Image: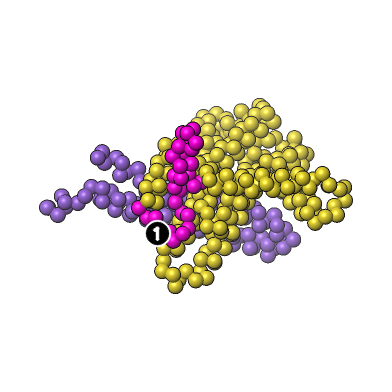
Amino acid sequence: MNFSFGLIKEMAAAAETTTEASGGLDIYNKVLCDDFLGTGFRITTSIRNTWIIMAALILFAIIVRIKMKKFKAVPESGFQNFIESIVEAMDNFVGSNMGEKYKYFGNWFFGVFAFILLSNLMGLLGFRSPTADLATTACLGFSTFFLIHFMGIIKGRKEYFKGYLDPFPFWLPMNIISEVATPVSLSFRLFGNILGGSIIMGLFYTLPFYVKVGIPAALHVYFDVFAGFLQTFIFVMLSMSFIADKIPDETKN
Amino acid sequence: MEKFQSIDPQAFVLGCSAIGAGLAVIAGIGPGIGQGYAAGKGCEAVGRQPEARGTIMSTMLLGAAVAETTGIYGLVIAIILLFANPLVGMLGQ
């Protein structure tokens, strides 16, 4: 975690020297407040933006909950149709990848999907994506890591531990390294893609104004919308296949 | 000889880091080839079996994402060298 803080510090230093270089786009992870309400927490741009996303998601959940009291068996309102279709789409997506019995993972993956998607799309509003911070993506990666091994141990039991001695017993160190590499590659893939996109955008916004007409829109469509959707999809999809990998096949249906 | 001794060690480390960052993103060649190959095979598969388009698409994206990993590692090394350089701190100033 030293690395993460080092990165924040360096970026804060860089932000101080090149305040207006990014032309209004928030590409640096600045330290906004060193000592939040006297608790000693350091508030950075990523934390503030994560809070904005959390507020949006919680607000959406509350609105759905209030409307839910009027839920009907046969949907009449467009709103209920919309909610049902997205929940069903996610459940079927999980069901087809992990087996019908593990559809309940749809709850978790819908939350992860919504969070990552909103944070990737945040660049459209000129905010810095929280997923362009290694701390956020490492948290998501380690949640997947925890789920992989938790499900592996409670569902696979003997097979889970036998898997480490596959194909030969002396292959154990290699298997352990590949298990540790899973969350690292998951989190670095998301982090690298989003940070790379935001750095390219930030560099583009430093150019003179006459090349900034229209072209940034195309860049936003590619780096924020296309790459954002794709990386969200890939993160959720890979998490699901890694978890499903550790669950024995006979329990899936 | 005088000229070489007057190089600021920090500037030297930063310059070499910039070259290293440039070299690190050469790692992008591998994923480019790999993803192109995956996309080509995906097109072939859709051509042969257009009704399985959805499954082929998601499998292809998964494969392309895994192929991308090494390129992303190169990119992360380059970003660390440029923005959070650990080598400058080792000069012991």
Q: Nearer the viewer, residue A130 or A193?
A: A130
Q: Is residue A100 above or below residue B26?
A: above
Looking at this view, name the residue that lies furthest to the top. Answer: A158
Classify the position of the C terminus of chain A by image quarter. Answer: top right
- Residue A42 visible, this angle: yes
Residue A57 pos. (x, y %): 65, 47
Residue B37 pos. (x, y %): 56, 59
Is residue A38 within the magenta segment?
yes
Label 1 neighbour load within 10 Å: few <14, some 14-19, many 20+: some
Residue A139 pos. (x, y %): 55, 39
Residue B23 pos. (x, y %): 37, 54
Q: Secondary structure at mark 1?
A: loop
Q: Which residues are magenta?
A: A17-46
Which amino acid type is marked by label 1?
Ala
Q: Is residue B29 above or below residue A8?
A: below
Q: Nearer the viewer, residue B43 or A58?
A: A58
Q: Residue at x 76, y 51 (%)?
A: A83
Q: Residue at x 51, y 52 (%)?
A: A128
Classify the position of the N terminus of chain A by image quarter. Answer: top left
Is residue A105 within the magenta segment?
no
Q: Is residue A64 above or below residue B41?
A: above
Looking at the magenta stretch, what is its main secondary structure? loop
Please give the residue where the numbered disc 1 appears in the rendered image.
A21
In the figure, the shade used to draw chain B is purple
Q: Nearer the viewer, residue A1 or B64?
A: A1
In the figure, the shade used to draw chain A is yellow
